[in-house]
Image: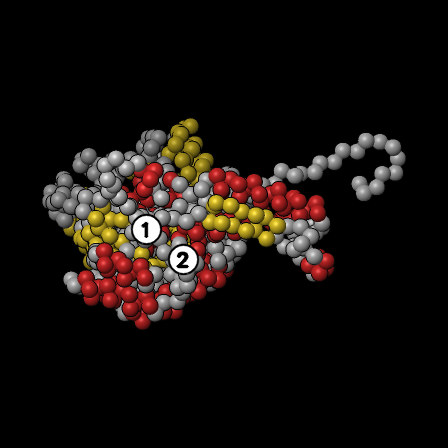
Amino acid sequence: MSFLVSPGVHVKEIDLTNVVPSVDTTIGALAGPFTKGPVSKIVTLTSEADLVNNFGKPNASNYEWWFTASNFLKYSNTLKVVRPESGFLNAGEASGVLVQNDDVYFASYYSETGDGQVTSNDWYAREAGTLGNSLRLEVCPSATAYEQDLGVGNLVNGAGAVGDTTITVDDADASGFAFQVGDMIKFHTNDSITATSNGAITTASINLTVDANSGTIAVGNRVIAAGIDEVVTVKTVTSQTALILDKAITIADNVSMAFSTYASVEDGNKEYEVTAINSEVLTIRLKDDADSGGLQTIIPDNSFITRRWRFSDRFDGAPRTSAWNTQNGRGAGDEIHVVVFDGTGDITGFKVDVAGQRTAAIIETYGNLSKNPSAKGPQGDSIYYPTVFFNQSDFVYWGDHISTGTNWGTDTTTAYTELKPITLVTFTGGTDDFAVTQGELELAYDLFADAETVDVNLVLGGPSSGVTNTAAGQDTHVTMITSLVEGRKDCVAFVSPYRAATVGITNSTTQTENVVEAFELCPSSSYVVFDSGYKYMYDKYSDVYRYVPLNGDIGGLCAATDGVADPWFSPAGYNRGNVRGAISLSYNPTGGERDQLYRARINPVVNFPGQGVVLFGDKTALTKPSAFDRINVRRLFLVLEKAIATAAKFQLFEFNDEFTRAQFRNLVEPFLRDVQGRRGITDFKVVADGTNNTGEVIDRNEFIGDIYIKPARSINFITLNFIATRTGVAFSEVGG
């Protein structure tokens, strides 16, 4: 209420409790080519396990980038990574296609209704790279595809003896199904009871009335009749003429039926896998047993066969009509089952076509999904199969409907039922391209450019030669990195010399010259930190030793320092500068060589016998003498600037008067006193009054706060003077 009209008590709250917030200081950033993962999208990692899960393991082409990330995560728990767009392609059913990430897929490829927008592929790998070529996917689109009894006319002819690995069949059944590689089959005899339906069932029903039959119909007998393609059994025998089935059927009046006992051949009801098909000759083996030697018992001629989808034991039953479709009067037979598995073993180490590895090779299973884009699950969530795969799958995207002409992707009252075999999708066309160009790297690093939307503090250069192992390549790469952090002005970048400057060279003089010459080309900046080389470390994923750039470790030391002290403490020396996981260094500079490096803005990393590998410098890449030529001072100001700027946002659109200025001073000064108490600064002064907020400033709708800081300085040089005196002389006489 702006004005009071009548007497009364009116309560207002004025919040003067604002404080300067704490800010993150340990978030790293890196771009580099990896074996998997989204392309051109920032992914936040918290551990090496995260790195493996999201971007794969290191290989001979990308290990420098990979271990830069991994080494940083040894010190910090937050790293943002971008996989550059290069020549990577996602594997697909028919060909490779580049789908960079989920955002691109949803915007350009996904269709909520109707067919997908990638007509060349029904399915394709979720992540670009050759690893996707290992993917396989099977869709079970109907109950008949799930399991089927092959009746009269589908007999085993001359099956033969124990040990036979091939059988000859007549696979022409009424539905047109043929056997497929991977099918599971059982053999059984048929003690058949014949009967005739009494009264047509024109809509699906589980109640069946029959005329007098040739024998006694019992619970568990299987029903064989024209138009019944899936396995249907008798659930309840009310009388010999009134039966209740376990599944609904639709048949005409006076249909001749057989009620089969389907007694198993005396082989323990064993199940066999079809491993090859040559016309009507099936090669088989005992399920998940490569050494079975074939048939376990004699299979008589004219035995019956039940064929089953090889992954059916992963599901509770066959796909049918979803509850949502039934309740809403939509089309029948909308459900499908889908299994994603490893075809070549490159993803899991297991292949589904190797006996005993079937379960291990299965990556994902999805049961009772719908072909209907409107279908919902019990919790109201979509069960439309493209949507489920987009929301849940780690491995595949949907590209286009598997089949046309059967209402897939349509909300219809017409049946979806499709009595086609299992659809096997083999992924192909996935490609890698680890030879990333400098331009591609720059586009990836550009994703970190916006300081308002992307919070990073420590930018890692990775292989600092970029894509060429030369001083010129390093200059191009470092210039790009420098431009990034100078533009943001809220983070520090870390770069190492190009690989050939130190690795493979035994002469330390030459190494020193190479490193100095390389960094002389690089621009001056207080936002960049140079180190002296590469460390030698063990790669447990490939069981080899590798040289990797040190900038991941140096950036990590800053993060570790923040954990044990504060950002304004130097990350160097024996207390906070110990490099982890280094067996040795490619270049271990001597004292004189360290002098040369330091004069050239390069921080030596030194292997001291018995004391480990230590960062032995805390310079920034600034060429002019300044407080900002030290890492601790630069990071101190980054913290102060970011924290106070964040707090100052709450002064926007307030009046530029003494109240607001006093509020600002009361906000900033306690924060700076706290930093002073924690040894970050030695003194400070905050000016926000009429002296700097003049009438002209106020009329320009501006506010000025001047913050004077005396930063604490790190000790780089220690002089110890040992003075000998004559006996009898008091120290006070010579103490100076």
In the rendered image, which residue does mark 1 sit on? 717
Whether 97 is drawn above or below 73: the answer is below
Looking at this view, is 196 or 267 the one in front?
A: 267
Task: For marks 1 and 2, give the CA distance.
Answer: 15 Å
- The amino acid marked with disc number 2 is Asp
- Residue sticking out furthest to the right: 6
Q: Earlier in the sequence, mark 1 or mark 2?
A: 2
Tag in front: 1 or 2: 1
Q: Is residue 200 visible?
A: no
- In which quadrant will I find the C terminus? top left
Spot occupied by residue 354 in the image (x, y as percentages of width and height): 20, 48
Image height check: is 395 above or below 233? below
Q: Residue at x 26, y 58 (%)?
A: 594
Where does residue 605 sit, x and y in percent of width and height?
27, 53
Is any atom of residue 687 visible in this view?
yes
Residue drawn at (74%, 36%) of the image:
12
Mark 1: which amino acid?
Phe
Closest to the observer, 41 or 15: 15
Residue where numbered disc 2 is placed: 629
Q: Tell whether 547 sits left or right of 18.
A: left
